[in-house]
């Protein structure tokens, strides 16, 4: 299995800020670094084209994350095309300061596999990285997560809290995994529907609430310290017991 993620950002590129659930701005660079290191793979930071060419030639990368001011116009696409012609099916995630639409279309036509625009949502970025690694068979979808006595093992779809198996359905596990992957962040109902059920899923407005109710019975019932919290008018958040609700 490939062992590294290449993170390319042009030297001197201005950083973006990310608005977190706490409403305190965070560095976009810090959010990206955290998401990449959460995969458990080594991260190679590159700021120049020659270093990128050399790294691609080594064929040791599982993913390339490229921060590009203009997603479509970049000389690195030629090097990526060459690598793919030589049998390296490297997935590419573009992060740009330009919103979707024409900018995203240009990036996809140039060779991108996925596209995000600032401001970034930390949990969404982690999910997109893991999805690309899974789709290209570089890594199973997601890694083990731990939070406040809760342990999630996606390879076996196993959820355990304080030594007790929770016996979750596939959809319940997917929902809980998404919430824990975004621990401390408010997840709106719309975000949950999009990421757990799919972008084109249409359902009654209470489907998320129904599944949250199921999860609370299995995850929090009988525990003095609750992990799943409702944020009135906003959505849901999972927090460790030592974090203020």
Image (cartoon, grey):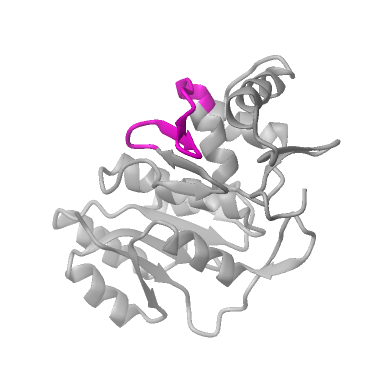
**Viewer can see residue 71:** no
In-image side of 139 versus 142 (left or right): left
Q: Residue at x 61, y 67 (%)?
A: 28
- 85 lies above or below 217: below
Q: Nearer the viewer, residue 148 or 15?
A: 148
> How many callouts does the rendering have?
0
In-image side of 98 versus 153 (left or right): right
Q: Quadrant of residue 217?
A: top right
> Range of the magenta residues?
154-172
In-image side of 5 versus 224 (left or right): left
Q: Nearer the viewer, residue 72 or 235?
A: 235
Q: Residue at x 27, y 67 (%)?
A: 79
Residue 52 horizontal/vertical position (percent): 31, 75
The furthest residue to the top: 204
Q: Quadrant of residue 80?
A: bottom left
Residue 125 horizontal/vertical position (percent): 53, 52
Q: Nearer the viewer, residue 235 or 66?
A: 235
**Viewer can see residue 18:** yes
The furthest residue to the right: 233
């Amino acid at each position: 299995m490939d062992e590294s993620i290449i993170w390319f950002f042009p030297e001197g590129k201005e950083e973006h800020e990310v608005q977190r659930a706490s409403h305190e701005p965070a560095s976009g660079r810090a959010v990206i670094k955290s998401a990449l290191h959460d995969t458990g793979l080594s991260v190679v930071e590159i700021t120049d084209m020659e270093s990128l060419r050399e790294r691609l030639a080594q064929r040791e990368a599982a993913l390339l994350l490229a921060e590009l001011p203009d997603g479509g116009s970049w000389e690195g696409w030629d090097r990526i095309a060459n690598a793919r012609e030589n049998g390296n099916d490297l997935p590419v995630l573009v992060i740009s300061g330009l919103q979707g639409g024409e900018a995203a279309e240009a990036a996809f036509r140039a060779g991108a596999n996925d596209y995000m625009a600032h401001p970034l949502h930390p949990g969404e970025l982690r999910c997109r990285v893991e999805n690309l690694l899974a789709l290209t068979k570089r890594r199973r979808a997601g890694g083990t997560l731990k939070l406040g006595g809760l342990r999630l093992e996606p390879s076996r779809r196993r959820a355990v809290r304080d030594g007790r198996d929770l016996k979750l359905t596939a959809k319940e596990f997917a929902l809980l995994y998404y919430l824990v992957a975004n621990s401390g962040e408010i997840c709106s109902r719309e975000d949950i529907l999009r990421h757990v059920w799919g972008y084109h899923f249409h359902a009654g407005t209470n489907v998320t609430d129904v599944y949250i109710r199921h999860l609370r019975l299995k995850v929090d019932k009988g525990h003095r310290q609750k992990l799943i919290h409702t944020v009135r008018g906003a959505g849901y958040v999972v927090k460790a017991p030592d974090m203020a609700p």
